[in-house]
Image (spheres, grey):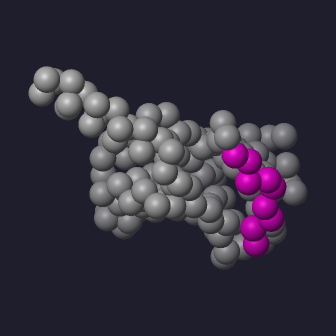
Amino acid sequence: MANTLITSLLLLLILLVITTPSSAWSLWPYKHVHVSNELTTYNGVLHVHCWSKNDDRGVQDVGVGTEFTWRFKPNIFGTTKWTCEVSTDDHRRASFDSYWEDLGQGRREYKENIFWVAEEDGVYLRIIQENRDQYWAKWQSQ
């Protein structure tokens, strides 16, 4: 009897989680991904295209010293993944996964905000707590 009650309550909770609008479900806070253009010697627009399995942010033009930011809620199964491709008018391109569930292996700074930075030699992941950028993706010629 107790097992049946526990199982029923668990199923009800799962059903509630799945059917509740994501904005109302506070256990899964929004993630914010930032892609910034710090190509100071290039001094041009960075074209940013980011997408997931269920969403596409389109191509955004990001000027030097500015950023493109979006937010989303990861799914409850831990399979949310975002990919970005960045390119310049001088024929450089880089692709990288900009979000996945174990990004940073539990580091606190990636719980809500993830910062990607396009610099002269490639794309970096900004590690706020250590005040440094980690080299992530090399520019390729188009």
Q: Is residue 2 above or below residue 141?
A: above
Instruction: Name the residue at the front extreme.
Output: 1
The front one of 52 and 6 is 6
Q: Is residue 43 above or below residue 33?
A: below
Query: What residue lies at 62% left-to-right and 51% top-to-bottom?
Result: 122
**How far across and down, in percent of the image, does residue 18 sit?**
47, 41
**How far across and down, in percent of the image, does residue 84 sit?**
67, 46
Q: Residue 119, located in which quarter of the rendered image?
A: bottom right
Query: What residue lies at 34% left-to-right and 41% top-to-bottom?
Result: 13
> Chief secondary structure of the magenta span?
strand
| Residue 107 horizontal side relative to residue 57, left or right | left
Query: What residue lies at 53% left-to-right and 54% top-to-bottom?
Result: 21
| Residue 86 horizontal side relative to residue 30, left or right | right
| Residue 50 horizontal side relative to residue 134, left or right | right
Query: What residue lies at 67% left-to-right and 40% top-to-bottom?
Result: 54
Q: Is residue 24 shown to the viewer in this render? A: yes
**How far across and down, in percent of the image, does residue 131 sit?**
36, 67
Instruction: Name the residue at the left extreme.
Output: 2
The front one of 16 and 131 is 16
Quadrant in the picture for the N terminus: top left
The front one of 2 and 37 is 2
Residue bounds of the magenta highlight: 55-63
**How far across and down, in percent of the image, does residue 23 sit?**
51, 61
Q: Is residue 38 above or below residue 53?
A: below
